[in-house]
Image: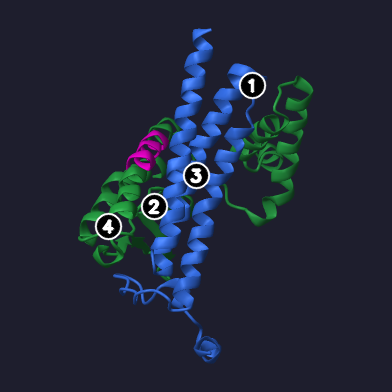
Chain colours: A green, B blue
Amino acid sequence: MGKLTRWLLPHPALTVLLAIVWILLQNQFSWGMAVFGLILGVIIPIGTARWWPDRPKDFAFGKMLVYCGIVLYDIIAANIEVAWIVLTKSNANMRPNWVVVPLDLKSPEAITILAGTITLTPGTVSADLSSEGHSILVHALDADDPEAVRDEIKTRYERRLKEIFE
Amino acid sequence: MTLDLIATGAIIFTLAVGAIFTFVAGIGLLKLNDPMTRLHAPTKAGTLGIGAFLLASMIHSWTFGEGSFHELLIMGFLFVTAPISAHFIGKVNIHRRTCAPLPTPPRDATWSTLDVPAEDLELDQR
């Protein structure tokens, strides 16, 4: 039984996600479409399972929602801050800086989400990973103090992601 | 009637917010003078500016027409793809050395973009 479900649903979360995306694409709900979305959601993960053999470990869904809320709030707050910097600071006064963030996270999914979060929150763009994946290179638009940016990323986002994924 | 009024107000507000932030992003693209800092402007417009426009579109469709969910999809795909394209533009800047010299990573030998196998070093120098 376990083997059969594993073959039929290699990525259960992906199945649900694909079905939801299909229903949203139709823009109006009907049961026929929902069933077709579920069929697609079963076929596509089976077809692509060969390229994604490991199933990502379960994560804490409730904490993920809280994390999304925090990130959305940060996007709005920091957007205003960056808009202010762009409009009022001259280029000569700006201090673009590289920030190196050493990573405690291990799972690739968590690192991907952290890198995406860093880019989406204004003022910082994640540019590169180190060759063994132990630290992430972040470009800050205007940072007098790279250590402060690094500590904020570590305490605000990485600690929460560690709780969610590990 | 009052609901229509509130909705119209909300639409005007979100459209104005979106317009302001997209405008600032455009100014940022023109004003900033270094490829790496210029990268900051479009990733910001992609999040708040377009997010506000899509919110306006959603409020409008739910009050004055048939409700629409497409905007949620646009927002989702935008939030997933914008960091990836920004990441790749950042990598191009590192490859072309059009940015400040990189700091050394604390635990590993080098950054993955600069990690060139010995047999390709000649190609990299070109």
**Residue behind mark 1:** B67
| Mark 3 vs mark 1, CA separation in Å | 36 Å
Q: Are marks 2 and 4 in contact (CB under 8 Å)?
A: no
The image's mark for residue A163 is none
Residue visible at 43% across and 42% down? B20
Q: Chain of mark 2?
A: A
**Residue behind mark 2:** A118
Asked if one can make out residue A156 in the rendered structure from this viewpoint, the answer is: yes
Are dots 3 and 2 on a single chain?
Answer: yes
Point out residue A21 in the picture as x, y percentages from the top left corner: 65, 35
Are dots 1 and 4 on a single chain?
Answer: no
Q: Nearer the viewer, residue A69 or B20?
A: B20
Vertical placement of residue A119 versus B75, above or below = below
Badge 2 crowding class, 10 Å Cα cut-off, few under 14, some 14 to 19, many 20 or more, is many
Q: Nearer the viewer, residue A50 or B73?
A: B73
**Residue behind mark 4:** A89
Q: Are marks 3 and 4 in contact (CB under 8 Å)?
A: no
Secondary structure mostly seen in the magenta stretch: helix
Q: Chain of mark 1?
A: B
Q: Are marks 3 and 2 in contact (CB under 8 Å)?
A: no
